[in-house]
Amino acid sequence: MMKRSKDLVVKADNYLLEIKALAQSPFTIMEVCGTHTVAIAKNALRELLPDTVRLISGPGCPVCVTDNSDIDRYLYLAAQPKVITATFGDMMRVPGTDKNLQTLRAEGADVRIVYSTQDALELARHNPNKEVVFLGIGFETTVPTVAVSIETAKKEGIVNYSVLSMHKVVPPVLRLLAEDEELVVDAFLDPGHVCAIIGIEPIEFMAKDYGKPGVVTGFEALDILEAVVMLLRQHDEGRSEIEIQYKRVVKAEGNPHAQSIVERVFEPVDASWRGIGLIPQSGLAIREEFSSWDAAKKFSLPIFHSKETPGCRCGEVLKGLIDPTQCPLFARHCTPMTPVGPCMVSSEGSCAAYYRYSQGSVN
Amino acid sequence: MCLAIPAKVVTLDGSIAKVDMMGNERVISIDLVPEVKIGEFVLVHAGFAIEIIDDESAHETEELLLEVADAYDEEK
Amino acid sequence: MERIMMAHGSGGRLSHELISTLLQKHLGNLYLDQMNDATVLPGGEQIAVTTDSFVISPLFFRGGNIGKLAVCGTVNDLAVSGAIPQFLTLALILEEGFPLEELEQIIKSVAETAVRAGVKIVCGDTKVVERGNADKIFINTAGIGYITNRLVGPEHIRPGDEILITGTIGDHGIAILSEREGIKFQTPVVSDCAPLNRLIDAFYQPGVKCMRDPTRGGVATTLNELAHQAGVSMLLEEVNLPLLPSVEGACEMLGLEPLYLANEGKALVIVAPEVAEEVLQNMQAHPLGRFAARIGRVQEGKPGLVLLETPLGGKRIVGMLEGEHLPRIC
């Protein structure tokens, strides 16, 4: 409710003054997290920052980076008789090769939007003659909630519940970005809710080994402005550290309890990121002892080798190499209603955020 | 990548808590923060408390909420 | 429990009973009681006509039900067009097996709301379809209103005009969502479903240029339509949007935007700047307009472009609703 107070404007002005004073030369910051992308666009922060400070969007939208083959695989599963697909609303419009969950539902598939894995488990309890499959999408923030549901299903003997894990983790993609020589990023806004779970240790290599300072940031406009100030101060003082701006939530050690639950249920595997490609140890698979609740093992699913859409430059957008508006398809062939690439699919995708909120997109 | 909002724990029952999110109540899981107590604020993501918040601004939110809720009740 | 059977739609005795013991009983009046194929009504030279069908799940929600909605929706369409709503038709499509008790509750709401809005239900129709061929009950209402000297419409909108809304945004959308399977939560939010014609009578004066009720698609979509039709740009001020904290909280929880949530008892009103303050005060003096607010203004600029100024002074686009407004977690 900060947004109605005058304090907000005063504080923001102070941050902006300091940013202007510190940013004497060009400084590029990548916001890794899609929720930051949306917060920046909704608050029109780019417009308020001086020209020297450039904010670019990174690969932090789990919907966007879900591989085409994974999408075709869950669409295949969702079309099976007796299967109830339980999913976060985010996935409904994501296009596979020729369908999405909404079109499947219109054709008769049983697809339910849930807010939580608890709701998905409840569906399984109420529909013992059906197979409830939860689509496991999300980064470290969401993974523990899925892990809990799998442990609960095992404990309670809920045999008609399973998860198709397409989960991904953030540190490996950060390393990939840091090693990309084309990419010009001076510093990172690190994802607040991911770090609430994993803490800062898993991303400290960014500051130590690659000299890329980072600030773990909250999601209010003021949080983001304060984080920009903190990054500029590090730069000004020649420091390279991972600092926490979002202290009211994030502890340096994260949430060890959640980490251990994830550790019990999931193990790291190589994973394909849409638009980026295979990243070693960047995905999470369900461990062998929970295989009865692993939809990938429970159902015999064909392997898909789906192609990426030609002409789509999402790979470059996800890595921050180009702005969405620099893609020739943007707002012409590719819109939120008819998304061509992953970044337009999710409301958190950089392209969708630019399309919906940015004045640049109408010119 | 992950929406999460603050909520105040109203009741506790095993691994389940009822929380208040600006006047809305929902049952959530506290499996990820088993040490949480009634009256504390937690960060809720997808129906789970993922962390306990130590934040005064959460209390400010609550006060403002009560003021407007009163005004709204009068109308009904 | 008594239930709707296929025979209730047969046109035979059961149909007749349903009409006389339930529909006519609650809705009867001078015109409806003519019971002819068409009803003869008194009228002026020019009338306004509208029709709308209502399908909603759940049928009963905090602040109303499908019956109340079916009256309000049509009354409001007439009222914001500058007409004085007079007569409504009522057509029911019932699913076999639908409990009569629920039907009676719905019809009572139709009756109460019609009284509140000062309109009469003057003819109707009832059909029953086999179980599974409809979802419990669908309602269609058509409405007739007398034309007044209220000249309202997007063609009157000019840069410099002010944009008012008669109350808080998104209440109906959240009230409905909170009862959906898989999302359910308890909320103090009550649907704003209400007939607006009395409120409009209370604040209308020359200088009110255009009125619209922002139902599906919400305030954002309605203003986009108006901006397109009028060939103007609009600028909203985020700090001035009237929003219940519980609506805001629910939106944050579900990843939704209040500007895209449905309203069923609100009007967007575009007024000339010189009367804006007086119109606003008259709105606020009426029980349905207590939280009325000035939310933005019409300006020169790219036709159809609706912008919103954030609390920090940045500006962003507010586009039309793209597809279904789905809850999300990321």
Image (cartoon, grey):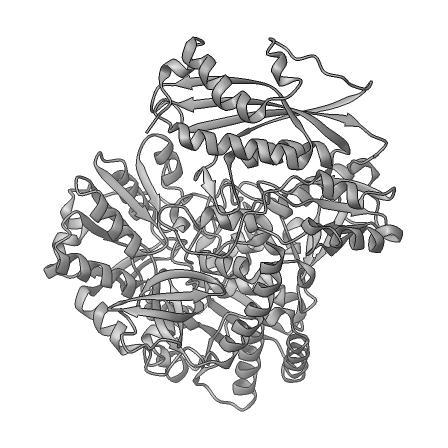
Q: In the image, residue A130 lies at what x, y percent?
A: 20, 40
Q: Quadrant of residue A206?
A: bottom left
Front position in the image: A253 or C124? C124
Residue at (51%, 35%) from the top-left corner? Answer: C66
Q: Is residue C130 above or below residue A215?
A: above
Q: In the image, residue C28 lies at what x, y percent?
A: 59, 22
Q: In the image, residue A58 lies at what x, y percent?
A: 46, 64
Front position in the image: A43 or A284? A43
Among all residues in the image, which is located at the extreme bottom? A237
Residue A294 seen in render = yes
Front position in the image: B68 or A242? B68
Q: In the image, residue A103 lies at what x, y percent?
A: 39, 34
Among all residues in the image, which is located at the extreme left? A289
Q: Quadrant of the N terminus of chain A?
A: bottom right
Residue A141 seen in render = no
In the image, A333: left or right of A278?
right
Q: Is residue A32 above or below residue C69?
A: below
Tag count: 0
In the image, C188: left or right of A174?
right
Residue at (74%, 37%) from the top-left corner? Answer: C229
In the image, A306: left or right of A291?
right
Front position in the image: A277 or C255? C255
